[in-house]
Image: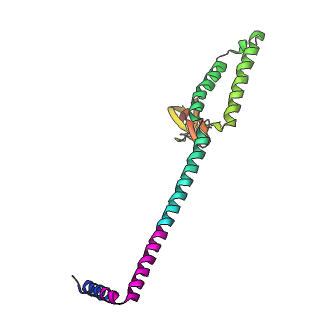
Amino acid sequence: MNDEQKLHDDDESVREGLAEETPELQEDDRVAELEKQLSDVRQEVLYAQAETQNVRRRLEQEKQNAAAYAATGFARDMLSVKDNLDRALAVIPEDLRSDDRMKGLVAGIEATGRELETVFQRNGILRVEAMGQPLDPNRHQAMVEIASDEEPGIVVQEMQAGYMIKDRLLRPALVGVAKKG
């Protein structure tokens, strides 16, 4: 035991001996102990309030995310419907488009595609820009490199459209990227 510890222990034993003889010292010790307990309890209350505030903030953020992104699974499923409509329109030859018997069918498919696009926009689902853009691995998935006069790394072909829901990627655009030809 070092000298400082020994002095401290001696002071404590003298104080205890005097406290037994002097009621004022006992009361001072009790007040000091209660003040320390009060300080400890105040600190614990502050920690508990801070933790409660953090939990409340976290839950509010989770609630906002759940509301904003609740339709993600449904939106992914609807993308295949949009793709099929686009493919159906793309394969209709020009001579059938001008045929009076087919005009109504073609117009109906085009109107359905436009309506689906409007519904997407209303729900924060937007098409990812790809053509002519630099390859962005956060939004594009390079499928092939294509010899081109364009600067290397520029998207020159879009095989499948990509979509975002608000600020999250719903599906990357499948693209062909320019390379030195």
Residue stretch in magenta: 16-43
Residue 15 falls left or right of residue 42:
left
Q: How is the image coloured?
A: rainbow
Q: Is residue 180 something that shows in the picture?
A: no
The residue furthest left is 1
Residue 36, horizontal then vertical, whole percent:
43, 76
Image vertical order of residue 28 relative to residue 96, above or below: below
Residue 162, horizontal then vertical, whole percent:
58, 34
Displayed quadrant of residue 79: top right
The residue furthest top is 101
Image vertical order of residue 99 relative to residue 114, above or below: above
Residue 109 falls left or right of residue 132:
right
Front one among 54 and 13: 13
Q: Is residue 112 something that shows in the picture?
A: yes
Front one among 58 and 19: 19
Residue drawn at (53%, 31%) of the image: 146
Displayed quadrant of residue 161: top right
Image vertical order of residue 57 relative to residue 104, above or below: below
* Magenta stretch encompasses residue 38: yes
Q: Main secondary structure of the magenta part?
A: helix
Displayed quadrant of residue 107: top right
Residue drawn at (53%, 58%) of the image: 52
Residue 58, horizontal then vertical, whole percent:
54, 52
**Quadrant of the drawing holding the N terminus:** bottom left
Residue 89, horizontal then vertical, whole percent:
67, 20
Residue 57 falls left or right of residue 22:
right
Front one among 111 and 122: 122
